[in-house]
Image: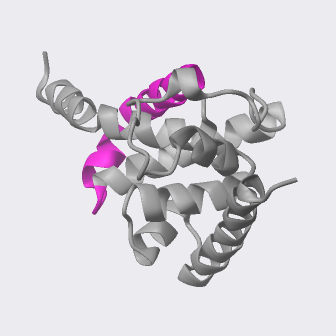
């Protein structure tokens, strides 16, 4: 095995779990998340020299993932599942604590967001990136990240509050 191939394998091994989590949070479907990550790794391999030269290799590969997600969104007109579908069976880790927001409800609310808003929320709050890092990954200004985040949080608040209000 050549040195670049070995470096690629190490890189993929160290980033796979994180990319799978991000992909799942973007699309809400483990199977589609696997497909998105696999395509991301194919693109990463094709452009491995560019990835190696990048200032932030993780951000470069996350950008590839975001592009794959957006390409899927545009090609298929959104998600393969309804936002109100039951995702409890797909939860990564069952959450039995009454003190934590029900992950299935949060995921359903997250899936109602447009792709770009969802990406900002996932990167900012679930991946812990700063506004600057998120802007770099999404190739937009920090102001765009702020406005997309504000819109997303407003929509999420409405979705989650709507569920709690009695009808």
The residue positioned 71% from the left and 56% from the top of the image is 164
The residue positioned 46% from the left and 43% from the top of the image is 22
**Residue 142 to residue 28: above or below:** below
The part of the chain drawn in magenta is 31-56
Query: The N terminus lies in which quarter of the figure?
Result: top left
Pick the residue in front: 124 or 108. Answer: 108
The residue positioned 55% from the left and 47% from the top of the image is 66
Q: Residue furthest top?
A: 1
Task: Please give left or right for residue 52 compared with residue 127 in the image.
Answer: left
Pick the residue in front: 84 or 139. Answer: 84
Task: Please give left or right for residue 77 compared with residue 79 in the image.
Answer: right
Task: Please give left or right for residue 79 compared with residue 33 in the image.
Answer: right
Horizontal and vertical percent position of residue 145: 58, 74
Pick the residue in front: 96 or 79. Answer: 96
Whether residue 6 is visible: yes
Q: Residue furthest front?
A: 166
Q: Is residue 71 magenta?
A: no
The residue positioned 59% from the left and 48% from the top of the image is 106
Report how many numbered discs are placed on residues in the image.
Answer: 0
Which coloring applies here?
A: one colour
Q: Magenta stretch mostly in which secondary structure?
A: helix
The picture quadrant where one finds residue 20 is: top left
Pick the residue in front: 95 or 93. Answer: 95
Horizontal and vertical percent position of residue 63: 48, 51
Q: Is residue 45 magenta?
A: yes
Horizontal and vertical percent position of residue 83: 75, 38
**Residue 25 to residue 130: above or below:** above
Horizontal and vertical percent position of residue 82: 79, 32
């Amino acid at each position: 095995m050549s040195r670049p191939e070995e470096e690629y394998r190490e890189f993929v091994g160290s980033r796979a779990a994180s990319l799978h989590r991000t992909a799942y949070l973007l699309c809400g479907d483990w199977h589609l998340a696997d497909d998105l990550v696999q395509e991301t790794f194919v693109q990463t391999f094709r452009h491995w020299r560019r990835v190696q030269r990048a200032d932030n290799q993780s951000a470069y590969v996350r950008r590839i993932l975001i592009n794959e997600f957006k390409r899927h969104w545009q090609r298929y007109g959104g998600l393969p599942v309804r936002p109100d579908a039951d995702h409890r069976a797909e939860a990564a880790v069952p959450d039995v604590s009454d003190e934590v927001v029900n992950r299935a409800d949060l995921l359903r609310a997250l899936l109602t967001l447009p792709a770009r808003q969802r990406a900002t929320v996932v990167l900012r709050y679930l991946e812990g990136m700063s506004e600057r890092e998120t802007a770099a990954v999404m190739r937009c200004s920090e102001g765009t990240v702020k406005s997309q985040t504000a819109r997303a949080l407003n929509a999420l608040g409405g979705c989650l509050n709507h569920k709690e209000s009695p009808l």
